[in-house]
Image: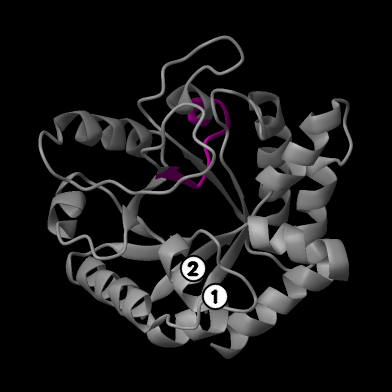
Amino acid sequence: MTRLSVNVNKIAVLRNSRGGGEPDVLAAARTCLEAGAHGITVHPRPDRRHIVAEDLAPLATLVARHGVELNIEGNPFAAPRPGYPGLLALCEQVRPAQVTLVPDDDGQLTSDHGFSFSGDLAPLATQVHRFAALGCRVSLFVDAGVTTLERAAGLGADRIEIYTGPYAQAFATGVPQAAMQACADTARRARTAGLGVNAGHDLSQANLGAFLAQVPGVQEVSIGHALVSEALYAGLAATVRGYLEILASA
């Protein structure tokens, strides 16, 4: 069954908008795990607008206690600065099961593109090897339709994460098939290259079932924005259980 990793960044956004400790990111993550989620995802950014470095150790302890995985996303090339020691340093501190490398810029609103695997890949290969040396599974964020996944495998990566934002947009307009096919083709190419397949960005209860029915071999979905938005109406535990029902029936 495809596994669900809940991204709790949006909980941190709400907390940081007022300062203080509410809503409590750790309590929200615990609620998700007690409802059956298979892991927690975070994406600490240099501007500290949501998950911050101080959140990571308590979250790592929580997921270890539940016997599930912590997935940390981020740009390995973002320079350290006060309050943000860099992605590698954060992973050295908490040793997540998985690190997902994303080529987002400083201050970028949200991740909106993946690695293309063109040009000189030596710097990226070095980063992959550094995270792998920590014992992390390394996943690379990619656009649906990328055709150079053999080069991604050659870097030493274990998985890719398909950027599903365009699929979600196409689904919302009622014409998802081309975007869905691009995701399915990418998943097949990844598996042929020996890479595992994750997916994430704007997946929701409305579009997830159709996606999994057409895209083969998805091992994990990382869902945050839609899940937290839906939880405002239905409650966090109930929303997590709703996603798990979709995954179980896919």
Q: Which mark is residue 212?
A: none
Residue underneath mark 2: 169
SS label for mark 1? helix
Residue at 20% over, 51% down = 152
Q: Is residue 41 left or right of residue 200?
A: right
Q: Which mark is residue 172?
A: 1
Q: Is residue 147 left or right of residue 92?
A: left
The spot of residue 115 in percent (x, y) is: 28, 46
Q: What's the distance in space between the residues labelled 2 and 1, CA to CA?
A: 5 Å
The spot of residue 154 in percent (x, y) is: 14, 49
Towards the viewer: 107 or 212: 107
Q: Quadrant of residue 19?
A: top right
Residues in magenta, as a range: 91-100
Towards the viewer: 133 or 160: 160
Relative to 59, say whether 105 is above or below.
above
Q: Residue furthest top?
A: 82
Q: Are marks 2 and 1 in contact (CB under 8 Å)?
A: yes
Disc 2 marks a residue whose amino acid type is Gln
Q: Is residue 171 left or right of residue 102?
A: right
Disc 1 marks a residue whose amino acid type is Ala
Relative to 43, say whether 240 is above or below.
below
SS label for mark 2? helix
Towards the viewer: 177 or 60: 177
For the question of whether residue 164 can be seen, the reply is no
Residue at 27% over, 49% down = 157
Callout 1: 10 Å neighbours few (<14), some, many (20+)? few
